[in-house]
Amino acid sequence: MAGMSMIEVLASEAVRVMAPSVAGAASGGARRLLALLTNRGERLPADPAGRVAFILRRAREDETFAAELAQELVAVDSVDAVAVVAPALFADREEVRARLAAPGVRLIGGAHGTGKTALAWQVVHDLRESINAYAVVDLDEYRDGAVLRVTEVRQEVLRQLGVPQVDDTAPIVADQYRRALRHRRFALVLDNVAGAAEAEALVHPWEHATVLVTTRVLTQDLRVWHPGRPEVLGAVDPDGAELILASRCGPEMLAAEPDAVRELIRRCDGIPSILGQAGAWLARRQGKPGAVAEMVARLRGAGEVGTLFDDSVRLSVAELDAGTAADLVTLAGHPGTDISDAGVAALLGRPADDLVDRLLDAALLVRGPHGRLSLLWSVRRHLRPAGDDAAFARYLRWFRDLAGAADLAMDPAGVTDRAREGRLRRYPAPEPAAWPFPHLRPVDWLQGEAHLVPDLLREAHHRGYHVEVLQLCGAMEALLTLRGHHWLCLEANAWGIAGAEALGLPLAAARLHALQGRIHVLLGQLDRADAELSAAESLVPDDADRQLTSSLLEFRARWAQERARLGATGELASAESMLRRAVTIDRALDDRRGLGLHLRMLANVLVEASRAGEALALLDGAAAPAGDARNAARIHLVRAKAWLSLGAAAEATGELDRARGLTTDSGATQYELELADLRGWAAHLTGDTEAARKWWGWVAYQYFLGEHPRAREFADRLSRETPGS
């Protein structure tokens, strides 16, 4: 029955996810679910209850179906909402081709090798039934240094378009060029235009013509000249990339090494010319096992294969001025996968808007959908930056200071230094920095940048910036407390522990081991939590740091509480004992922040020990510092639990409403599961079975996604919560 209740959770979630699909507005994940549910030719019921029953019946009949349903649901959260285009050459350019294949002037930008010319040729081919002639001219063939031989270009265009008796004198050619093409239906490709002056000389408002202007450097004057939005070419999509590779080396070779192929495409940046070179290299190794993986390995070390890819990047970099090229080398030394505009300025130590514009124009830098900037991997590999230590230090300390602002923002306004010491910073704390982004809360900034932290800490550790590593790890505690990000914080703290050991700071290492233990408790990994907490306890001798000892007792009590929830005997009593010891230490130290926290946690343990009356009395003496909305919300949550255990749903609901408001005010989002759980209990007490199942079903599903042991607990609860129960 418990297993069936988990299927109920999955069935309900499947119906929710695919509802738009049934109505005809399918996302990628919803389409796959719908296909799975109807793969036997059966018609899906129209109403939600009928769909749930349909899924439950299929699950009982077919265990494989149930497993596939779970896999598809887990995949939905990470499904790319953009539909994948069918694999074909230029498949990833379908939308661009549709925009380009119409009368008018179009500007196409992109670095060497991104396929500008090939795309233009393809558009001309697409237009073949609607034009009478076409011309394709590479302007690089008509230059003397920086001077374009405009008259010769005009003559060549006129000849290719079939204009009779093209003159030899410049004024007459110019007049012919403007007048003779006025009413013709043709396509013109002007390849490799260098600036607006060339474009103005060669492009006229021909009513029926499609004019495609390509450029390697999308300069500001070209943007001003062009009447619409330029098309900037970057990588081809994975299917198109595989097709380019397969056209050289054959699909069988790629099918044998799918993981290596994905990595190869990534390292080629999806650039067509580079992929073509890679395919040619592979073609010479047909039948050799592991050839694709070998190529990826050689790319990591450059050498023979790496030289194949230098030309495209080298040509683009060569067109930059010396200052821009030097800044590009510095930017290439940034350790992360992407960077913000403010981060570029921090790295260089000066405003960088103009530099970013120049690199975007040269298509060496790409701006992603969320505004973040990324360098092509091939640019980094070509430049092979040794790493500007001064630039790295600037960026690291800028990042640390802003992350530290998120940490300090957790302190209520007006707190004393004593309260800040209560935050257990066992490392040299940096000076607070002015906050530069008035439109962003510090924790929101940190969440947006958090994916860079592991790479940044790794580089900082290897460069010997151990103090900064510790400071940044300390700041990450704000992200952990307010938003979760458990796995990322685990990885970050591992570097912090290494830094603390390098600096000989055992108390700092103990704090980070304790945090690792806390995270593992939250993830339900109690064996790993025990190991981390034991490591922390071994680093804090008796009376070495009583405040840290109190915190360790708190974390160990949480570990015991989770063990009790999983059925271990005697653990609630152990948790109570440890929290009472922590409270004694807090009172002796006059640590009011720690005291309020530990009294609230002790009350929570008493509720779970069926001593709700004692818990409510204890909470009367528990208080969060003024302005500390998050911890105040936690007190209301424990009060709600106590009232629920006493059967007082109305009082509990009032406490939950107050907790909800306070968590919203504080920006904390990691208490959603607990709030939903308690909402479910309140609904259960009032006999609202449907609402209880809704809340608990959502909690069960979230735990299921995280492979948390408590998923079974909520599945069991759902199995008992049936209509009329």
Image: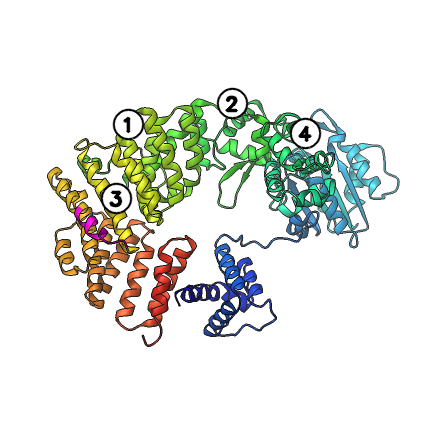
User: In the image, what residue type sits under mark 3?
Assistant: Phe
CA separation in Å, label 3 and label 2: 43 Å
Q: Main secondary structure of the magenta part?
A: helix
- Can residue 432 be spotted in the picture? no
- Disc on the earlier residue, 3 or 2: 2
Q: Which of marks 1 and 4 precedes in the sequence?
A: 4
Return the residue at label 4.
308
State the residue position of label 2: 386
Give the farthest residue toward the bottom: 724
255 on left or right of 343: right
Above-or-below relation of 341 to 677: above
**Mark 4 or 3, nearer chain start:** 4
Task: Tell whether label 1 touches label 4 (CB within 8 Å).
Answer: no
Q: Quadrant of the N terminus?
A: bottom left
Pinpoint residue 226: horizontal percent, then vertical percent. 63, 42
Q: Give the amino acid type for the residue marked by disc 2 in the picture.
A: Ala
- Structural crowding at the residue carrying mark 3, measured as other residues with C-alpha within 10 Å and reported as few (<14), some (14–19) or many (≥20): many
Which quadrant would residue 649 be assigned to in this image? bottom left
